[in-house]
Amino acid sequence: MKPAPFEYVAPTRLDEAVAALAGSDDAKVLAGGQSLVPLLAMRLATPALLVDLNRIPGLDEVRFEDGTLEMGAMTRERNVEELPGLAARCPMIAEAVALIGHVAIRNRGTVGGSLAHADPAAEWPALLLALDGEVEATGPAGTRTIAARDLFVTYFTTSLAPTEILTRVRLRLPPPGAGSAFAEFSRRHGDFALAGAGAVLALDADGTVADARLALIGVRETAVRAELAEELLRGERPTDEAIRAAAEAVDEALNPVSDVHASAEFRRHLAKVMARRALLAARARARGGGEDG
Amino acid sequence: MVERRRIALRVNGRELVGEAEPRMTLADFLRDELGLTGTHLGCEHGVCGACTILLDGRSVRSCLLLAVQAEGHELTTVEGLEREDGSLHPVQEAFSEAHGLQCGFCTPGFLLSVVELLGRHPDPDEAVIRTWLSGNLCRCTGYQNIVEAVKLAAARLRGTGA
């Protein structure tokens, strides 16, 4: 057996799970397991206790109505992918989720697990940031709400306390008529992205940008909003030149590293290209069709 | 030493019981405790797809589940694909006829992925097939004949091809 020994509990109530976490100083929460189990197998994680959330009923409930997509933390990524009407209402979410691993990974992988794991190249943190989302977390002291901008601290690190369990995720969907898109570049299908971008563009009746959102992955310690790029677009006409300038302006939000997969410079380049592609696709959808103009 | 747990589950239509430490993966449990060695282990960390099985009808990597998590669930492994009379499943037949395998090591994982795919997309185009199978690695075939096998199996299961 590859993992080191650990104790295991699979409570059927959230308060039991919280108590189990609080009762150990070396516990890990098991959600979909698509990141944690490989870490166990490689003994990069050697917790004394695993608290499995998979037996707690109700943690996978999804509410998708009007302006909100609210998901229990244990919602499987495939269940999000299969939500009727989601791809039409917010293509950015549908496109991003389809880029996560492979079907068999998404059949198990959960929304809350991905957010709590906080891989800087993962898609969910970018969606949470771009859509001004928030999460709920329950610990011994009760339940609190954490805004997206306060959740991600650094590589694989969130502001969740070790005794807190992420339980719900709320995304505020763009207004109807807004365009959105997700673009990323990876070496192989299903790999983590070298760089990626999610974009939302809402246009006024006169065609100027009422609101712009741009979130990037794979380019620094956490997913990040490209605020300068968003500022450049708001109130402007989203011409090819304006979008190119905004995509160039993501530079200030980047702090990429060089590794075996890509140099920092290549990631910087890719981030701008992905930002431009996502913005162009979002613009086309906001205009209800045509790619150009 | 951490205590072994009793695990009762349904595999290929049969109620089975086994024991495992919590750290034992479902893949090791299937092979070493239940003797179902048709499920193959390649990378053992969720990359290669060789150990793919169906859990409650959905494809999962059995190396990324713990055996204890399968308690009470329904599993299908490659051993469960053959028909009651011992003949091959149409997807297995198609892989055989279209030469969708060479060494065969990755094949059980491919077969289970294809069973789920064709259950949801009875008439998939090549792009859909390649997307759905992107999580299964094959080092022999170059994938061409695997894709052909899926098309053949799809046609037969729809009852439109021979």
Image (spheres, rainbow, N blue to C red):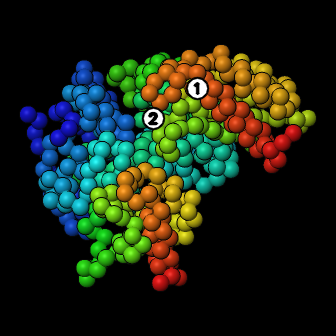
Q: Which chain does tag 1 point to? A: A
Residue designated by label 2? A114
Q: Residue at x 87, y 30 (%)?
A: A237
Circles 2 and 1: CB atoms closer than 8 Å: no
Name which residue lies at 29% across and 74% down. B82
Say which of marks 2 and 1 sits in front. 1
Circle 2 sits in a helix, a strand or a loop, which is it? Answer: helix
Q: Chain of mark 2?
A: A
Taking the image as shown, residue A25 lies to the left or right of residue A120, namely left
Residue shown at the point (50%, 50%) measured from the top left: A79
Q: Which residue is mark 1?
A: A266
* Foreground pick, B126 / A286: B126
Residue A116 is situated, as x and y percent measured from the top left of the image, at: 43, 29
In this view of the protein, can residue B30 be seen by the observer? yes
Amino acid under label 1? Phe
**In terms of sequence position, does the residue under pointer 2 or pointer 1 come before the other?**
2
Q: Quadrant of residue A28?
A: top left
Residue drawn at (19%, 64%) of the image: B15
The answer to whether any part of residue A199 appears in the image is no
Query: Could you classify mark 1 by the number of other residues whose Cα lies within 10 Å: few (under 14), some (14-19), or many (20 or more)?
Result: some
Residue B142 placement: quadrant = bottom left
Q: Quadrant of residue B13?
A: bottom left
> Which quarter of the figure is the C terminus of chain A placed in?
top right
Q: Amino acid at mark 2?
A: Ser
